[in-house]
Amino acid sequence: MRAMRGGRLAWVLVTLVSATSAVRAQRGAELVGFDARQAGRGGSDVAVAEDLSALLSNPAGLVQIEDEWRVDLTLRAIETRFSYEDPFNVGGVSSDKLLFAPYLAVAWDPDPGDVGRPGDFRLGLGILHIGGVQNAFDVSTQDYVDPLRTERSTDWLYSGLHLGAAWQLTEELSVGATLSGTFSQLAVTEPFEVPIFQFQGPSPLGSPWGQLLNQTFGLEALRIEGNFESEVSLGGAVTLGTLWKATDALTFGLTWRSPSFQQDYEGEVDVDISGIFAEPDPVTFPNGFAINYDGEIVDFEHPQAIAVGFAWRPWEDMRLSAEVRWTDWSSTHANLDIRLRNGDNQGFNDFVGSDSLDLLQTQGWRDQWTAMVGLEWSFAEGWTARSGFLVQNSPVRADEASPSAPAFSTWQVAAGLGYRTTGWAVAVAWQHTFDRDVDVGDSSVSSDLDGSNQGFGTDSVFISLSLFF
């Protein structure tokens, strides 16, 4: 038996490691649900947590897995829809993507003979994506010379390898913890808005360039096209949870996820101001307008979150679950701190007054409250139908909306179907995030977004396969 267990464990670890190469190639939108069963309930899981989505929703639920081994595999297909319109883009532009995200997790009971009894202990390990977004489009702008267009694109992945453990303290109470080793990559192309007085290099008239441009043309800022592509950023987070079975029909769950401990995003940044000025001055810019920096985005981390909920069976074949989650976006997404160093164009460095340039972009995110409700009906032996919805406030005010982070969806509905038999189970689910448009008015992020209308929505299909042995 020991040799058999060791062989199974080796197979699982090899499968997990080989899957990471595929994971890094995937991108997604804001993610709600790691499994078709959780997704079909509208994301509500903190008081259910009976499969490997518990690793992040409530690790205390891992002890509810009855088999010695369980493997959960999920493939998620995500259609994202982003639209943008402003006075210079009448009719609008859009970015529609079809993306795929795989999930893989395994649970193991070291002592399968004590299932459900005090002292029961269970381990879980999985690759689960936490968040991401991808879009790309060209927009017209008044700021640049012909062809009067600038590119905007975002490609962000935040994922991790999660190791969880759960203990059955009493017949009614269990606790659990998950240690997440996270990895993330970020690639952004968009104009940086730089206050004009940051350009402190001496002009031919003796005054700083920023002062001269402000006095001569009334400029308050320059929007400079920049392209940033980070290396892999590693980090970590902890999720703690508890599950209390108050009665045979009623269960309560509570979890806390720590803020992430994330490395700064580091990578090369390519900057070019040729879109602003048609011809470079051969004296001031003998090497042209393009420059390469060593770039760093500082203290861009994932926030802490707290979730509480219940699951109630009014009848044996029916279960209602509900969850409320608070996410502390205001502590981590107030500003975007970008630091550029070691510029390689001396003419541009002389224009700035240094080979470094610091940019502080306002984000101003608020804390977010999310409510999720799910309903499950076991209508025949082995078969379960699911439905649910999610409602939340947008953490982004209208004046702070940005194509780089379209986090202003507020409503989502879901439906799913599952079948379970001896040794395996399969489930499918569909999630629809209603398209929501935001009218920006005067943007506090960048004035080139003034008067814009931005819209975002998603549809997701989940297919989950579970194996028990």
Image: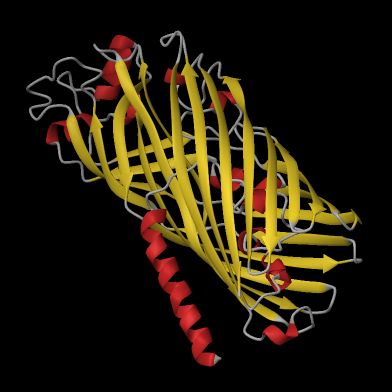
Q: Position of residue 388 (x, y in %)?
A: 74, 42
Query: Image point 41% across, 61% down: which residue?
Result: 19
The residue closer to the viewer here, 292 or 116, is 116
Query: Image point 36% across, 58% down: which residue?
Result: 21
Q: In which image quadrant can residue 89 be found? A: top left
Q: In which image quadrant can residue 343 be found? A: top left
Quadrant, the N terminus: bottom right
Query: Image point 14% across, 20% down: which residue?
Result: 204
Q: Position of residue 127 (x, y in %)?
A: 50, 61
Q: Position of residue 111 (x, y in %)?
A: 66, 86
The residue closer to the viewer here, 14 or 338, is 14
Query: Image point 52% across, 25% down: which residue?
Result: 444
In screen coordinates, is 275 left or right of 256?
left
In screen coordinates, is 292 left or right of 69?
left
Asked whether residue 163 is in view, the answer is no
Tell me if residue 355 comes above or below residue 11 in the rendering. above
In screen coordinates, is 396 left or right of 3?
right
Quadrant, the C terminus: bottom right
Q: Position of residue 41 (x, y in %)?
A: 72, 47
Q: In which image quadrant can residue 307 be found? A: bottom right
Tell me if residue 238 comes above or below residue 296 in the rendering. below
Extreme residue toward the bottom, this view: 2
Name the image colouring: secondary structure
Asked whether residue 91 is in view, the answer is yes
Question: How many marks do you count on the picture?
Answer: 0
In screen coordinates, is 424 left or right of 265?
right
